[in-house]
Image (cartoon, grey):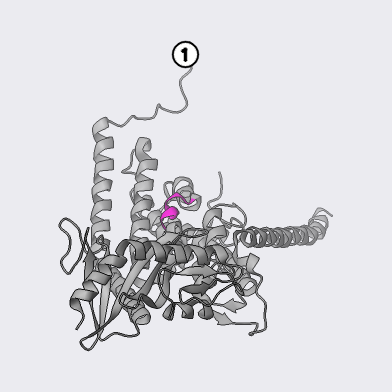
């Protein structure tokens, strides 16, 4: 019988092992489009977190009520409701950021991370586990977007959260806040992430090999 | 001999159950959206009104008060055209210092390099001089086209130029009172902005002149 995953693993997996952006390569549309500044990255992350957690809680609570035939339609309806609420709240509280994000807030409806988690996890697991999964995935998404936003804003504008970092003589690399800068930063980030993962895996193998040999002897 | 199936066939839901499920969740979604709309709408309206008031202040030089006038087919009117709301109506704003009229704040909109550019400008019809200009919405290329929002030397020219405006490249002006020196590296965006202003002046200029003539002291 398969051993059940400890609840803490449901939280941690989304941050590193199954990071939605850096491992699963999901949600790349907002990742590339709105990470030209840290502020936009954080606002998009907050909206996605709200929608992901809200949808996961609701979907896992009602999973027995929804017939299989209409489950996707129901999940989309739930996700769209949370997105509409997030859109209105952003417009009311941070109108400038809302204007900058434009259509990308509404496009959270079709973000693969959200529907993917509902179909693959929340519809098959308890409310508690679904909450942990959603929180972990949201942290992973937020971390990826924040790193992207930080690199692009620092190099592309010489600022962090609008505050000058490199002084008035810095000549910004404008390309970093343009779409090619998004692809370039994501490529570099994926490269670094993959290198770190391989290195830790290799280290784990070298540590485990002498122990196994000793046990065999 | 028939082999018994390992899994029982999936139970099919009745059409009534499918309709009830989707209808129920649709109603719940509608209710949540209406609540969110009711809560956020007053703040969204207040934010928009504050942003507009700040823009009018900037282009008219902080008037003591201003009247909102709606553009009808052949006149300006203080009453909303029938069948339209304040958000939908085409409006201009007539500012006063005490009882002395300053001029109109007019919103213009036109295609830019990336997307539409929306701006507001101050205009005094008797002298045909502009009083100022502020870009309200623009998605022009960061570092290039977005200079129409940030370049103070370019923007300050709109505080004295005569309308309709003519855009000239740097060093090619003839010193005419209707010339604006366009931004090097943002020529298309500068030209688009000027075109939007001229198109709006052509459309509402005669109405502004008539209204100002009738209401001057």
Q: Is residue B129 magenta?
A: no
Name the residue located 22 percent from the left edge and 71 percent from the top edge: B211
Horizontal side of B30 relative to A172 (left or right) equals left
Which residue corresponds to mark 1?
B2
Observer able to see residue A131: no
Residue B118 drawn above or below residue B180: above
**Highlighted magenta segment, given as a residue range:** A105-111
Residue B62 drawn above or below residue B37: below
The local crowd at label 1, few if under 14, some if 14 to 19, many if 20 or more residues have their Cα within 10 Å, is few
Horizontal side of B115 relative to A36 (left or right) equals left
Residue B60 position within the rendered picture, expressed as x and y whole percent measured from the top left? 34, 81
Q: A102 or A109: nearer the eye?
A: A102
Name the residue located 59 percent from the left edge and 68 percent from the top edge: B144
Task: Determine the secondary structure under disc 1.
Answer: loop
Task: Report the magenta stretch's main SS.
Answer: helix
Residue A188 position within the rendered picture, expressed as x and y whole percent measured from the top left? 69, 61
Looking at the rendering, in which quadrant would you find the N terminus of chain A? top right
Q: A92 or A124: nearer the eye?
A: A92
Residue B163 position within the rendered picture, expressed as x and y whole percent measured from the top left? 40, 71
């Amino acid at each position: 019988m398969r051993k059940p995953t400890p609840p803490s693993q449901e939280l941690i997996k989304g941050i590193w092992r199954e990071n939605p952006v850096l491992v699963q390569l999901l949600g790349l549309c907002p990742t590339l489009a709105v990470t030209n500044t840290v502020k936009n990255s954080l606002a998009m992350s907050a909206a996605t977190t709200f929608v992901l957690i809200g949808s996961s809680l609701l979907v896992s609570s009602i999973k027995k009520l929804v017939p299989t035939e209409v489950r996707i339609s129901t999940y989309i309806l739930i996700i769209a409701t949370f997105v509409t609420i997030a859109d209105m709240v952003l417009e009311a509280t941070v109108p400038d950021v809302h204007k900058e994000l434009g259509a990308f807030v509404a496009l959270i409806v079709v973000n693969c991370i959200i529907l993917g988690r509902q179909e693959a996890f929340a519809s098959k697991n308890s409310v508690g586990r679904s909450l942990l999964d959603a929180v972990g995935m949201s942290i992973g998404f937020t971390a990826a977007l924040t790193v992207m936003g930080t690199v692009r804003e620092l190099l592309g504008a010489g600022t962090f959260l609008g505050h000058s970092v490199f002084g008035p003589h810095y000549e910004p690399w404008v390309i970093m806040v343009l779409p090619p800068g998004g692809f370039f930063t994501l490529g570099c980030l994926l490269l670094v992430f993959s290198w770190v993962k391989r290195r830790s895996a290799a280290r784990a193998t070298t540590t485990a090999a002498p122990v196994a040999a000793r046990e065999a002897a | 001999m028939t082999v018994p199936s390992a899994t029982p066939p999936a139970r099919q839901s009745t059409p009534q159950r499918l309709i009830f499920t989707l209808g129920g969740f649709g109603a719940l979604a509608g209710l949540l959206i209406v609540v969110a709309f009711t809560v956020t709408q007053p703040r969204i309206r207040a934010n928009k009104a504050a942003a507009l008031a700040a823009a009018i202040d900037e282009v008219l030089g902080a008037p003591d008060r201003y009247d909102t006038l709606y553009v009808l087919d052949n006149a300006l009117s203080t009453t909303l055209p029938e069948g339209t709301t304040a958000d939908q109506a085409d409006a201009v704003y007539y500012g006063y210092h005490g009882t002395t009229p300053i001029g109109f704040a007019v919103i213009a909109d036109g295609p830019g390099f990336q997307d539409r550019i929306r701006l507001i400008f101050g205009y005094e019809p008797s002298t045909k001089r502009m009083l100022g200009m502020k870009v309200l919405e623009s998605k022009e290329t960061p570092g290039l086209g977005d200079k129409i929002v940030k370049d103070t030397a370019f923007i300050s020219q709109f505080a004295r130029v005569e309308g309709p405006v003519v855009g000239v490249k740097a060093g090619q002006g003839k010193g005419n009172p209707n010339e604006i020196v366009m931004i090097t590296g943002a020529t298309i965006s500068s030209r688009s902005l000027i075109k939007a202003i001229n198109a709006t002046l052509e459309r509402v200029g005669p109405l502004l002149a008539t209204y100002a003539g009738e209401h001057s002291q």
